[in-house]
Image: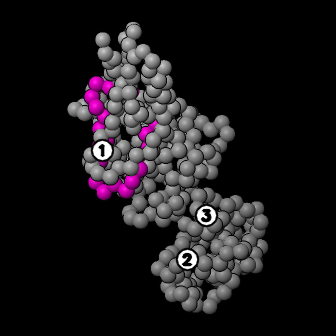
Amino acid sequence: MASSYSTDLKLELMVTGENSGTWGDKTNTNLNLIQQAIAGFESIAITSTNTTLAMTDATISNARNAVLQFTGAITANCTVFVASGIEKTYIVENGTSGAFTLALNQVGGASAIFGATDKTSKIIYLNGTDAVDLGIVNLTNPVTLTNKTLTSPTLNTATLSLGASLDTNGFDIAFDNATGIDDDSGNQQIIFTKTASAVNEVTLANAATGNNPNFTASGDDADVGINFTPKGTGAITFNGMGKIEELKEKVNIYTTATTGTMNFDFLDGAVEYHTGTATGQFTLNLRGSSSTTLNTLMSVGESMTGAYLNTNTTFFVSTITIDGSSTNVTLEYQGGAAPTAGNAGIDVYSFTVIKTTTTPAYTILAAQTQFN
């Protein structure tokens, strides 16, 4: 009875009493074929769109290798074929160049495919009909993960690119302190800073047609406010109409008596109340602060309004200056005349400063009102 050959590796299967005198050579050939199947490596150049690997009976063949490396500059989508009926496992490296796909196919079945830019390695098995990609992740090359769960992953890359929307699946995104969200040029847009044992936060809600989005203070406390803090002498700007349901305003209260030059610092607040009884006539000097001029704070076409509350008997404001000067300052009083006396009780000096030119020049609209 003649020898036959195994289905998968094409090893010669000898029958008892056959091949007298050559049995040893044939056994060695089989061992070499097994070695090729277990440890063999071959680099195969892809020179056409269809390449067929050979698995020849009792002969060293490229389809029998354990590791296949495909090389060459491909100019179209290419397929490498292995005969059907063979069951085998491969490590396949796509070493080709060119932005085209490379497929390993068991003739007539499904293919395991490297994408046009997928120059990685795959573990692929043949089940006799199809070539099946085990989908094992290559940690050193770009990989597309589909329906995978990553447990406590660390992404060590400068940029993570998403191919679709990010769904947090009901979980939060945790930012390290002083980190946040950048734009697509790497510039910071939002920075999150943390407070130890924080219990309050803000909630941003979108809205349906005809309604406004909502920015809300939320948290464990019963009463939670929101602070908006500009940097330096910057200002909070509302680009459009504003609507206020209720407003609380800071009042700076001083016990010092009014006399001489009294500096009114807008950066510290818009209302000053001096509870000490005035001891002399006084000049009210409007400025940003001791280190910031009002000229720096204001642009042409802007106004600022304040109030100075003076506890009084007979003394009153003699003039109002800006940044220590009355040059290019036009002072207009309600009723057409500047005050000539103080009043018992509290005199409230209210004033609106309008910057009219870059010179700079200002117009001040002022009023004196007695409260007693």
Give the left or right position of residue 267, taking residue 237 as reference: right
Kind of residue indicated by mark 1: Thr
Q: How far is mark 2 from mark 3, CA to CA?
A: 16 Å
What label sits on residue 231 in the rendered view? 3
Give neighbour class at mark 3: few <14, some 14-19, many 20+ (Cα, 10 Å): few
Q: Which residue is mark 2?
A: 298
Q: Which residue is mark 1?
A: 51
Give neighbour class at mark 2: few <14, some 14-19, many 20+ (Cα, 10 Å): some
What label sits on residue 300 in the rendered view? none
Q: How far is mark 1 from mark 3, CA to CA?
A: 67 Å
Of circles 2 and 1, the one toward us is: 1
What span is in magenta? 67-88
Q: Is residue 69 magenta?
A: yes
Q: Reply above or below: 63 against 333.
A: above
Q: Position of residue 212 (x, y in %)?
A: 34, 50
Question: 312 and 32: which one is in front?
Answer: 32
The residue lying at 38 percent from left, 63 percent from top is 241
| SS at badge 1 | strand
Q: Pick whichever of labels 2 and 1 is earlier in the sequence.
A: 1
| SS at badge 2 | loop
Q: Are marks 1 and 3 in contact (CB under 8 Å)?
A: no
Q: Look at the image and tell me in which quarter the C terminus lies.
A: bottom right
Give neighbour class at mark 1: few <14, some 14-19, many 20+ (Cα, 10 Å): some
Q: Reply above or below: 41 against 227.
A: above
Q: Position of residue 352 (x, y in %)?
A: 53, 75
The residue lying at 35 percent from left, 49 percent from top is 46
The residue lying at 48 percent from left, 34 percent from top is 40
Q: How far is mark 2 from mark 1, CA to CA?
A: 76 Å
